[in-house]
Amino acid sequence: MTGSPKGDAAGCRPVPLTVLSGPSGVGKGTVVAELSRRVPRLWVSVSVTTRAPRPGEIDGRTYRFVDDTEFARMVAAGEFLEYARYGEHWYGTPRRPVEERVAAGIPVLLEIDLQGARQVRAALPDAFAVFLAPPSWAELRRRLIGRGTEDDADVRARLKRAEVEMAAAGEFDAVVVNTSVEQACQELITLLRLDGCPHEQPGPPSAP
Ligand SMILES: Nc1ncnc2c1ncn2[C@@H]1O[C@H](COP(=O)(O)OP(=O)(O)OP(=O)(O)O)[C@@H](O)[C@H]1O
Ligand SMILES: Nc1nc2c(ncn2[C@@H]2O[C@H](COP(=O)(O)O)[C@@H](O)[C@H]2O)c(=O)[nH]1
């Protein structure tokens, strides 16, 4: 892990808004699922996309799946905090649910691509940006191909894009290497201060 934990150390408050990016297949969704299981109070934004659902993906949970017309309507209505084209499809983060959670003091996490991460940081400079990196290039290929959800052309396009994304890792506040899901998840919990105040020393006993 590189980078420092962020947050209000005095109050041990978690980071209000975190962006998690990294190349396709690095394991963002897998790590975020484990993080959500371990930290139920963390709210993970549900993105809108024009791509088709993969087997097992549930509308409204994994993504909200819409057609191009609805996506364009949402863009025109200013409903996105950020949006980007990735490959053949559009992806965007609905603005209102994020703003409502942040205002209510609920820690929010956005799992989005590099373009989206840049937009969020331009709009909200206090957002904390974490780059999830693979242990090696070969392992990234193995994970992406092993997932079996994209055809060969799409895998090639995603790996090509990954070169650009990996080169941008230095723009982020912290880099977490996803060697194991458990280790990456624990590092995120520490970085985002989702663990309360485990390192705080008890003060001296008060005088009787
Ligand atoms: N630490 C890990 N060790 C081994 N395999 C992993 C690890 N993390 C994730 N994987 C596997 O790698 C594959 C890709 O993971 P995942 O779908 O979570 O990636 P992603 O970054 O969310 O991809 P995308 O951006 O395309 O949605 C999955 O098959 C997952 O089980
Ligand atoms: N800019 C945004 N990128 C997003 C959003 N939701 C997901 N993503 C990223 O898109 C790619 C491809 O996703 P996949 O599910 O088709 O594999 C990946 O990097 C996601 O993180 C979003 O709302 N905005």
Image (cartoon, rainbow, N blue to C red):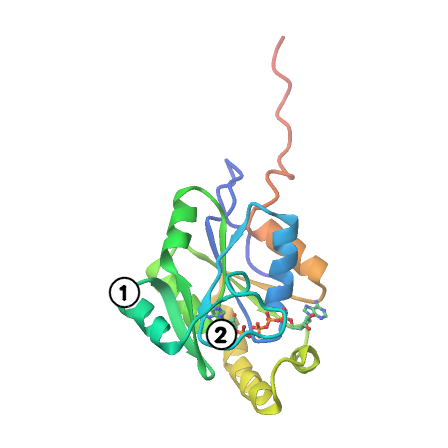
Vertical relation: 146 (above or below) 93:
below
Q: Residues within 10 Å of mark 1 (few under 14, many from 20)?
A: few
User: Taking 78 as reference, is 159 left or right?
Assistant: right
Within the image, what quadrant is residue 174 found in? bottom right
Question: Which sits in the foreground, 83 or 177?
Answer: 83
User: Taking 165 as reference, is 140 left or right?
Assistant: right
Q: Is residue 1 visible?
A: no
Question: Which sits in the foreground, 49 or 23?
Answer: 49
User: How much space separates mark 1 and mark 2, taking CA atoms?
Assistant: 31 Å
Question: Which type of secondary structure does the marked residue at label 2 adopt?
Answer: loop
Q: Which residue is mark 1?
A: 77
Q: Amino acid at mark 2?
A: Ala
Question: Which sits in the foreground, 108 or 195?
Answer: 108
Find residue 106 and report its horizontal and vertical position in percent: 48, 45
Find residue 79 and report its horizontal and vertical position in percent: 33, 62
Q: Residue at x 50, y 69 (%)?
A: 170
Q: Residue at x 41, y 78 (%)?
A: 85
Q: Which residue is mark 2?
A: 168
Compare marks 1 and 2 and give the one earlier in the sequence: 1
Within the image, what quadrant is residue 141 found in? bottom right
Q: Amino acid at mark 1?
A: Ala
**CB-based contact (under 8 Å), mark 1 and mark 2:** no
